[in-house]
Amino acid sequence: PIAPFAPPCAAMAPRRASAAGGAGGPASIDAQAVAREVLRRGENGQYEAVLRVLGDDVAAGNGSAARKAFLRISMLIHPDKLPGFSDATRAFQALVTALDLTQKKALAPEPAVVGKTAPALSRSSEGCVRTEVLCPRCKEPWGTRQEGNPDYFYNFMMQGLRSFTCSTCLTNFGCLTAIHKCPWCKDVFEYSPDQYHQKVTCGNASCKKPFGFTMYHASENALRQARQQAQEELATRVRSIEAKS
């Protein structure tokens, strides 16, 4: 393992959206060494250790701390920051996978009960918008009509039920690592799946307009398939981790 890093200086991070009605890059750190270590830990299935590569205390179940650690590391090893490092894209994908996987364990859908059909979820989308979701790697919009995906894939993304592959750079990511933009001020805000059925504000002091997240109609069969796929993906990754440990 590489030697412990000096604590980086404070960095700007997306604000976390708050319930409606209710915040310089790291210096003197070898970014390529960080990227190599992220890749090494990721390839060994040590995803929680990936998020601790800069010394952050990322306790199990602490999604906010994990997200902050992800942002600090990504500011160092994003491929745009390491144009001369051939494994930059692989290292960044390992970082994205680390956050999505470690946090998805807490969000894993309940196993389906044999013989029981889960009802299709529905609610009013009054006051809701389809927020802009961007790839964390290339920052291109996700879910455009050109991709050909049904509208209800937005539900699955925002609830953390599925990860998707960016059609531009092929990075695989979910809602926890995606970039989310406020529909009003267009500023970046921090999003969590527990906000999907809430009205929130983006946290920008100059933007206090609340918004919710559109829910598109999805059939019972589509929901069942999404949950099954999420369970299978998580189980596959867990087996991979166990095989490497």
Image (cartoon, rainbow, N blue to C red):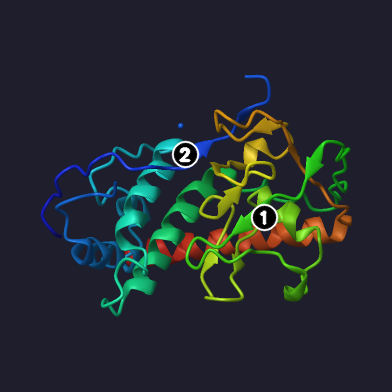
Q: Secondary structure at mark 1?
A: helix
Q: Nearer the viewer, residue 208 or 216?
A: 208
Which amino acid does the dot numbered 1 rest on? Answer: Met
Q: Nearer the viewer, residue 84 or 106?
A: 84
Of the 4 image quadrants, the one containing the N terminus is bottom left
Question: Where residue 119 sits in the image (x, y, percent)?
Answer: 88, 46
Residue placed at 89% from the left, 38% from the top? 124
Q: CA distance from mark 1 to mark 2?
A: 17 Å
**Residue 62 visible to the viewer:** no
Considering only vertical position in the picture, is 84 above or below 20? below
Residue placed at 85% from the left, 60% from the top? 221
**In screen coordinates, is 64 left or right of 211?**
left
**Residue 170 visible to the viewer:** yes
Q: Secondary structure at mark 2?
A: helix
The circle drawn on residue 63 is 2
Query: Within 10 Å of the Cα at label 2, are there few (<14), some (14-19), or many (20+) other Cα atoms?
Result: some
- Mark 2 or mark 1, which is nearer the start of the sequence? 2
Question: Where residue 22 sits in the image (x, y, percent)?
Answer: 62, 19
Question: Where residue 242 sits in the image (x, y, percent)?
Answer: 39, 61
**In screen coordinates, is 96 left or right of 226?**
left
Count of labels in the image: 2
Considering only vertical position in the picture, is 194 above or below 216? above
Q: Nearer the viewer, residue 181 or 74?
A: 181
Residue placed at 57% from the left, 76% from the top? 168
